[in-house]
Amino acid sequence: MTDNTILLNGLKQGIYIENSDYFNIKGEKVPRVTDVLSATIYSDALIYWANSLGFRRIKYKDALTSAANIGTEAHKHIEEFLKENKICDTNTCFQGFLKWYNMISAENSNVNIIYSEKTLVCDQFGGTLDCLIEINGKKYLVDFKTSNHILYKYFIQLAAYAYMLRTVENIDIDGAIILQLNKKDIEFEEQALIFANEEHLKFFQLCEDCFFTLLNSYYYTKSVENGYNNLFKNKG
């Protein structure tokens, strides 16, 4: 395993990835934020969706792969725009993002991109945030979604990224935004938490507390699974 860690703000940050796995500075494999949430939060809506596909004789895995590909392509085009000012005319999700970006650029005098597709790793977990944007001197963490609905767990995901920004990069944010991009029409839905609003801030702090509770559950579950395998599955 190659050590590609770097010195940043006087702290050594483990940011290396091998075979899509994240490793901390100690060389220990750590879960992605999305892996923690997927393993600990279950959605009835996903089950209903899978069942509806079955009634229409559509293979669940094929539909899931197609949805994932749409999301991956949208993120790629957004990253190319934010880093290279490259515009894609054919991707509907990207055009929805561009509509949002042009709107905030027109409404605000100073809009700057701090990070796009930034990978962070701390001692216990890692992840790649979509965008950190500065609007009129205020920093906002933005997550782009191509799912059909905005879910509460998306803010738990952003809270985990905000924790890494604060502890690894020494960056405090002023708000968090979920931007849902429509796959069929050039439209978007924005849900924003503005931390100057005390209710918004308390909710986001609750999301961070929730993530660490889920993270502990994730590690305990893995320990029990490994213990079981060592006792029973791995015996001759």
Image: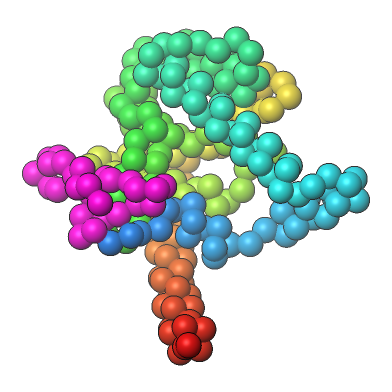
The percent coordinates of residue 127 (x first, y second) are: 39, 47
Residue found 63% across the figure and 31% down from its top: 70
x and y, in percent, of residue 82 in the image: 41, 19
Please state the horizontal and vertical placement of residue 181, each as a whole percent of the image.
62, 29
Q: Is residue 176 above or below residue 151?
A: above
Q: For this rendering, which residue is in front, 232 or 25?
A: 232
Residue displayed at 38% across by 29% down: 116
What is the span of residues highlighted in magenta in the rendered image? 1-27
Is residue 22 found inside the magenta-colored segment of the image?
yes
Location of residue 205 by image quarter: bottom left
| Residue at 39 percent of width and 33 percent of height | 117
The residue closer to the viewer here, 71 or 198, is 71
Q: Quadrant of residue 179?
A: top right
* Residue placed most toward the observer, 219 or 115: 219
Q: Is residue 70 above or below residue 22?
A: above
Q: Is residue 169 left or right of residue 139?
A: left
Q: Can residue 234 be spotted in the picture?
A: yes
